[in-house]
Amino acid sequence: MIEVRHLVKVFDARGHEVRAVDDVSTSVQRGEVVVLIGPSGSGKSTFLRCLNGLEELDSGSVSIDGVDLADAKTDINAYRREVGMVFQHFNLFPHMTVLENLCLAQKVVRKRGKAEREEKARALLAKVGIAQKADEYPSRLSGGQQQRVAIARALCMEPKVMLFDEPTSALDPEMVGEVLDVMKTLAQEGMTMLVVTHEMGFAREVADRVLFFDHGKLLEDAPPAQFFERPQDPRAQSFLRQVL
Amino acid sequence: MTRKHRRNWPWHVLTGVILVVMAYGLWYSTSLISYEWRWNRVPQYFAYHAEEAQRAADYGTVTAIAEDGESAQVTLSAESGGEQVLRVDRDSLQVAQGDDVSEGDLVGVTRHWQAGPLLWGLWTTLWISVAAGALGLLIGLFTGLCRLSNNPTLRDLSTVYVELVRGTPLLVQIFIFYFFIGTVLNLSREFAGVAALALFTGAYVGEIVRAGVQSIARGQNEAARSLGLSAGQSMRHVVLPQAFKRVLPPLAGQFISLVKDTSLVSVIAITELTKSGREAITTSFSTFEIWFCVAALYLVINLPLSHIASRLERRLGKSD
């Protein structure tokens, strides 16, 4: 479903180049849950952001269901509709209520009627367990609640793929569980998911595959059981020793 | 240290005392130069009772005078056969029944209230401010977005505009608009004045808008784009509403400045508040009184403006 071929992303940091994503190729099947792991600065977030065009590629190609992101003829907005994204810092729109947050893209992009979009929004809020907060502003919600709203907001567009960029890293420890539970439910329902995370427990339990990144390179691609028990790459071995 | 409950009212009383002392000092110093305060001359410059003379149109006689209340209805029969009916104020009646009148004779006057120069000036200042402010806001919004555009030409042009306007005095810009551009394009003085003020305000509003948009976290735009919104939709629905809330205080300051800067268009002979004040002084000689009134009239515009701005700020702040 997702095909990544020789993806390269270079940041120009004051004269010297940083190869944030360095010649990465992989593919993800429909319904697969892929967890991206690696030390900070290893390029896993940049890789994820390249998948929906938030970062422009320097070379290589990314395609979802055969639609090539690098092709100049591709409508980037249409492409992004099919790819939901959840951010580390939630990025809810603070000037709108929760319900308005969920309805904005449905109204502007999908052109859904008021009754239809609100019904959809309330159903998704119920699904992530915060139906009663529909008319609150995001600033009144806890971090965990905000992140669940952000997930519901992405789901409103009925994406084919969900990208999670460290969704629990900015949360207080007691709120991590509620967000991970929502993500597990999604995974069980067959959503195709790419998750950048430091939650090794989640990776072990939910992932179909684990990708290990370091210095922009994809170093290991294995099922979680094999990755956590018998990592092949020496850098993956030392990383796991530090975090487990 | 524990928090103590402080009593504030003695300090407010002290503030009042200081203001009273300052007012007294002002009055005392003017009495030293033997300035004679004549506030009674001022009201007529706001509104006055205008008299309009009613005159006989032809030779004839007064055939009837019907009085009702404050006014009187005078019927004149002309020698040539026509009849003229005039309504005048009763206490100004100059004729009695049976009098002969000749053409142009004063029969009486009618009085009505008319706005004086200061009120007209206030009105002119007000509409120039509103027109220049609305135009300036549009120009500023456009300029601010151009400054942030990816297109180098738009960016360059908007930068040149902002730097040119901010780097030259408004007074000079008004002269240029009136004497140069106004002459070349044959513009009226009001148009030249409003255009100069709007362009001046636009440059500053542009910088305020740019700063406001840049202050909104990049993640907001990224979240909107990742939902499939186009760049324009993201700007319109997500970034600008948040930016507007942030730039409201400097924007209000800019508009208050604009109201005061309209006093400069008096140099191209637009009779706004300041020029009306100067004209009122030439006939009344009450220099101090008129200038104090002019200052108060500017406050009459600006105090509600800043009140509205702070209320709007509170209303937009309900999502915080």
Image (cartoon, coloured by chain):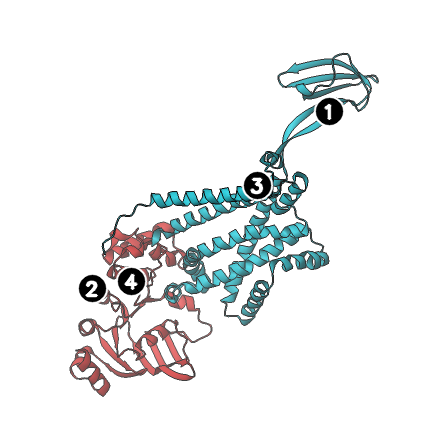
Chain colours: A red, B cyan
Q: Nearer the viewer, mark 3 or mark 1?
A: 3
Q: Nearer the viewer, mark 3 or mark 2?
A: 3
Looking at this view, is A193 or B79 the one in front?
A: B79
Determine the image quadrant of residue A84: bottom left
Label 2 environment density (alpha carbons within 10 Å; few <14, some 14–19, many ≥20): some
* Tag 3: amino acid: Ser
Q: To which residue does mark 1 refer?
A: B54
Looking at this view, is B29 or B73 the one in front?
A: B29
Q: To which residue does mark 2 refer?
A: A181
The residues bearing labels 2 and 1 have C-alpha atoms spaced at a distance of 92 Å
Rendered view: A232 above or below B278: below
Query: Where residue A5 appears, x then y in whole percent?
Result: 36, 81
The residues bearing labels 3 and 2 have C-alpha atoms spaced at a distance of 83 Å
Q: Nearer the viewer, mark 2 or mark 1?
A: 1
Query: Where residue B140 appears, x then y in whole percent?
Result: 53, 59
Quarter of the figure that contains the C terminus of chain B: bottom left
The residues bearing labels 4 and 1 have C-alpha atoms spaced at a distance of 82 Å
Q: Is residue B36 left or right of residue A26?
A: right
Tell which subunit mark 2 falls on.
A
Question: Any mark on residue A151, and which?
Answer: 4
Tell which subunit mark 4 falls on.
A
Quarter of the figure that contains the N terminus of chain B: bottom left
Question: Any mark on residue B31, and which?
Answer: 3
Question: Any mark on residue B30, and which?
Answer: none
